[in-house]
Amino acid sequence: MRLTPRNATSAFLAVCVLTFFVTFLSGCKKAEARKEGEILIGFSSRDLSAEYTAKLSEAVVDYAKTKPGVKLVMVDAQSDVQKQFSQVENFIAQKVDAIILNPCELEASTPAVDRAKAAGIPLVLVNQVTKSAGDSYIGSNDFDAGRIAMEAIAKKLNGQGGVLMLHGIMGTSAQLQREAGAREIFAKYPGLKLVDHQTASWDRAKAMALTENWIQAHKGKFSAVFAHNDEMAMGALLALERAGLKKDVTVIGIDAIAQALTAVKEGRLDATVFQDAVGQGKGSVDAAILLAKKQPCPKETLIPFQLITRDNLSQFLK
Amino acid sequence: MNAARPSLDRNFLNRFGILIALFTLALVLSVTTDSFASASNLTNVARQVSINGILAVGVTFVLLTGGVDLSLGSVVALSGVACATFAHPGDHSVFVPIAVGLLAGAACGLVNGALVTLGGVAPFIVTLGMMTIARGLALIFSGGRPVADMSNELTALAGDFVGIPIPVLCFAGVALAAWFFLSNFRLGRHIYAVGGNENAARAAGVPVEQVKLFAYGLCGLLAGVAGVVLAARITTGQPNAGQAYELDAIAAVVIGGTSLAGGVGTITGTLLGVLLIGVINNGLDLQGVSSYYQAVIKGVIIVGAVWLDRRQARS
């Protein structure tokens, strides 16, 4: 069958009408489903394609299901600040009782927080802070993560040697604080030298290419790689293994994603820093419920980081 | 209106211009860094350009017909996820995940082609739609998480064969086949004819729709190849991989002298464009240039190369 312009147009219109109806009907269902006295929470996740965030978001959704009288709607911002801003605006328009925001960025996500505040809707920040404080923050101090990871490198190298650092997306609060924490350790051990540092945007393929290039430029001048997350640590690890240099180089990441734990178990990755995704997720739901009920809620709940090496790995594997 | 006639002079100048740029850059890097000219670094560059190279060869076909494919990066992610899903150790023979990855790519390409030819929708719109559809499918199939636990047989695809990285061999094979095809097959000449002047080609009896369908399908298939190679390289199928890969691929093709209007361009040019971008990326990393400056420098070089090319073409 040949698609003429005319029947193509009618087909397109039909699809539009269908889409409209489906959206409309599901919208009605949602509105009806909201019972009297039910607490409605809107949750905007930074990026469900990032393993750590996916784990956290899953914990938020699952934990909210165990709470009677609570309904949680999750949306995915896909690392797009603009998209997340509109999602928060939509939550405000829906008059949710509380918002849980897992912000994309330190600075750029701030207007979304301010908008919720202006609308008088309580907002919980999870995992990452913004310039404006929310009503509650559940997370871990990324400064500590950078410090713990670099301290482990310093110990491994006996305070002497060259280090390469892979940054996350520049300007995210995790990147800024993890770098600041690491720099504190560099100041403490004058024998540690930062040979080169560059962003690989939390991305494994980019970290791998960058490490390959660094191996060419700085071969023999570095004995450790500190990556701001495990995805990049895995990229650096693959590049070093391929070049046959892994035995001379310590690699440490942050987040304790499943693959990193497996790599630690196999003795490939030296260590990772555990950030409690499930603890953060649950904590944010608890805070949102307290705030929605207008009950007192702590301004900040910090969930500590822990270094995972082969020695204490077993307690973190499910 | 004789755009269909690729002038010999112009092609010659094109290649010559980029070659000069490539050599100058290589020379500067050899002098200013200790590591650029080493055999291991050059292998490194070759390995890093291979994925962009495979994509660039594919999109050359589409650009030659006067179309464009913006869905490449998402199709790479989808193929990678599809491949990794079937690549768990002990599940299937290594050929199954490869075939699934390639099929996913080819299917996206054929859908693009069908909508462009049968639906009559502008390629920009069709492939923009496919860009988000393929990304969405990659996220759906993977549940938003990287698909890990790939068999060693598959990840070995990123390893070496007689000292040469397999991705480089894939790229070389693809480029060679494409070059041979475009210059020696009737369908190859039809691709130039369609891009040069579609109406004239149709009047001359060229099956325009089939030619375009072939170009998009092939481009999708090669995006599938790139997806499988990338998954092998990073040992996971990443639903968020390949962001903006289409831009690097199209930039390489355009630097290589292919006209966005269609009908003019060569695989040799594309090859040089890919190498130029690869050497720039590698060189800037070796020099320790911050990634902020890298982005600016890359943009300037892309626009500069095309501007020079057009000036030469006019004179």
Image (tube, helix red, strand yellow):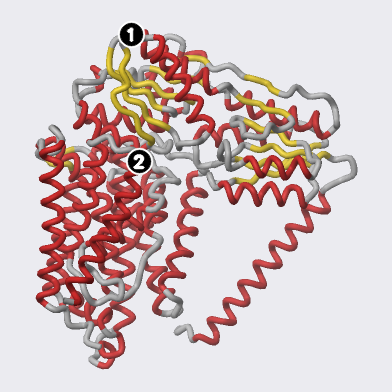
Considering the image in quadrants, where does the C terminus of chain B appear? bottom left
**A275 relative position to A153: left or right:** right
Circle 2 Cα neighbour tier, 10 Å, few/some/many (<14 / 14–19 / ≥20): some
Indicate the amino acid at tag 1.
Gly
Residue A161, above or below B49: above
Circle 1 Cα neighbour tier, 10 Å, few/some/many (<14 / 14–19 / ≥20): some
**B30 relative position to A14: left or right:** left
The location of residue A34, given as percent across then percent down, is 83, 47
Quadrant in the rendering for residue A237: top left
Residue identified by numbered label 2: B291
Residue identified by numbered label 1: A159
Judging depth in this view, the residue of B41 and A14 nearest the camera is B41
Quadrant in the rendering for residue B222: bottom left
> Which chain letter goes with mark 1?
A
**B282 relative position to B88: left or right:** left
At a point 45% along the width and 46% down the height, the residue shown is B239
Q: Are marks 1 and 2 on the same chain?
A: no
Indicate the amino acid at tag 2.
Ser
Judging depth in this view, the residue of A45 and A151 nearest the camera is A151
Q: Secondary structure at mark 2?
A: helix
The location of residue B279, given as percent across then percent down, is 20, 47
At a point 37% along the width and 23% down the height, the residue shown is A226
Judging depth in this view, the residue of A152 and A267 nearest the camera is A152
Residue A228, above or below B228: above
At a point 71% along the width and 41% down the height, the residue shown is A114
Do we see residue A161 in this rendering? yes
The location of residue A102, given as percent across then percent down, is 62, 36
Separation of residues labelled 1 and 2 (CA atoms)? 29 Å
The location of residue B168, given as percent across then percent down, is 18, 47
At a point 39% along the width and 15% down the height, the residue shown is A186
Q: Secondary structure at mark 1?
A: loop
